[in-house]
Each structure stands twice: as C-alpha cells, then as structure tokens.
Image: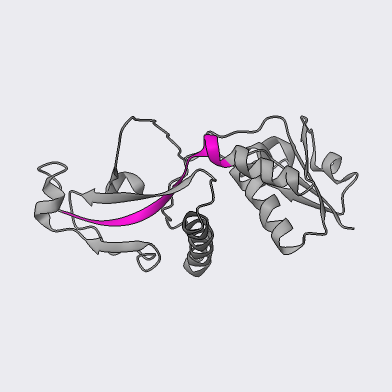
Amino acid sequence: MVRVTVVGGGVNAIGSALALLQRAPECQVTVISKDFSDGAAGFWGPYLNPHTPEEKILRWSQETWDLFLGWVRAGQQKGVSLVPGSCVGRSEVPLEFWHKIPIGYRTLTQEECAIYGPDYCSGYSFTSIVAEPSHFLPRLMNELRDRGVVFKKQRLTSLEEAAAHADLVLNCTGLGAYDLVPDHNVYPCRGQVMRVGGAEEMVCDWRLTR
C-alpha cells in the first residue's frame, strides 16, 4: 500500500487528497497542517498566469467545472451551487480565453453594462459555480474521513518531516512553502475576500481582475 502525506490544510490540499483517492483508492493518505482553513474564495473564474501555458489552465478549468457541475446536477450537498456573474469594464472587454466552458457566456450590450454604472460600456455575463468554503471544506473532509484519511493538526518545520513515514508527499502549502521548503521565490501578489449579504449575482470590474 502506497503511503501518501498531503501537507496543507486549504482547498488545494483537501481537493488533492480527494482526487488522489478517486484515482488510487488503495492509497493510505494522511493530511498534515497546523490549521485547516476555509477562508479562500470559491468562485469559478479562470485567469491567465504568464508563467503557466494557456492550454494547461484551460484543462484545469474544464476539469474543475465538470467535477463541480456534476455534483450540482447530482444534488450532492457539498456547498456547491450555480450563480450568475457579470464582468464589466470602462473600455473594451475582450472575449475570455475560457468562454466555451461555463454556461451561457455572452457579451453584454452597452445598455446592460450601464446598469452597473454610467462609465461601464463593455462586458460579459455567464453562469458560474461557487463553492462556499465554510460548507465545502468540512463536507469534503468528512468524505475523506469516511475513506480512511487521517487528519493531523501539526506544525512541520520541513518537508523531510512529512516524508519520514510516506512514500509520496504532496506539498499543498501555498505561501507556507516560503519557510517549509524553503522557497523564497513564493510571495503573495493579490487576494482580497469581502463577504456581502444578499447578492444574487456576482459582478466585478474587469480591470480589477487583471
């Protein structure tokens, strides 16, 4: 039996553990983190990274979309739901490279854009998927426990600690890799999450998504 240790307590770590067991259910998986976080935003919407090929981002985005949409259609209570979204700009908003993936992607008219403010003249709308982390992560963790996954709340000082009793280590620590690896090329570049009440549609300024 292959012993796998997943290091990290966020959605990437929990999602990686689930994906691993779906493909190799015979693995013995342990997830280690100093804490388990549900603070990440869960709105599906890809963006280009200059260091990652577009075709790879498209593949990841399509696989994530298919998985989440399958959960929604099957009525599985994982904290995942469909939500309409729009993105508008004060100048021409180009067709997104991922426009063929979500439901109902379409270009907005100037009149539709102006609803969000007189300066907005271009944009698009589509139906996306949102995973509410405070529901999503605990439910995935319960599913993993049912599959025999062990969760350990522990602060590691190196990946070597994680590898001591594992055949394979998945590093899903994100910014934590700065000290753990250590990888001093890792740094925060963005990430603002604001919770608002009662929004039936997610709307963003295209310029702020770049």
Taking the spot 37% from the left edge, 66% from the top edge, the residue there is 97
Q: Position of residue 173 (x, y in %)?
A: 66, 41
Q: Position of residue 163 (x, y in %)?
A: 85, 46
Furthest-front residue in this view: 75
Magenta range is 122-136
Q: Position of residue 146 (x, y in %)?
A: 74, 45
Taking the spot 39% from the left edge, 30% from the top edge, the residue there is 195
Taking the spot 56% from the left edge, 34% from the top edge, the residue there is 38
**Horizontal placement of 185 versus 144: left or right?**
left
Q: Position of residue 161 (x, y in %)?
A: 85, 39
Is any atom of residue 51 visible in this view? no
> Where's the N terminus, which quadrant?
bottom right
Is any atom of residue 71 visible in this view? yes
* Residue in front for this viewpoint, 64 or 157: 64
Most prominent secondary structure in the magenta stretch?
strand
How is the protein colored in the picture?
one colour
Q: Is residue 65 above or below residue 131?
A: below
Taking the spot 72% from the left edge, 30% from the top edge, the residue there is 34
* Residue in front for this viewpoint, 123 or 153: 153
Queried whether the magenta region covers residue 201, the answer comes back as no
**Horizontal placement of 105 versus 78: left or right?**
left
Q: How many marks?
A: 0
* Residue in front for this viewpoint, 58 or 20: 20
Q: Is residue 34 above or below residue 54?
A: above
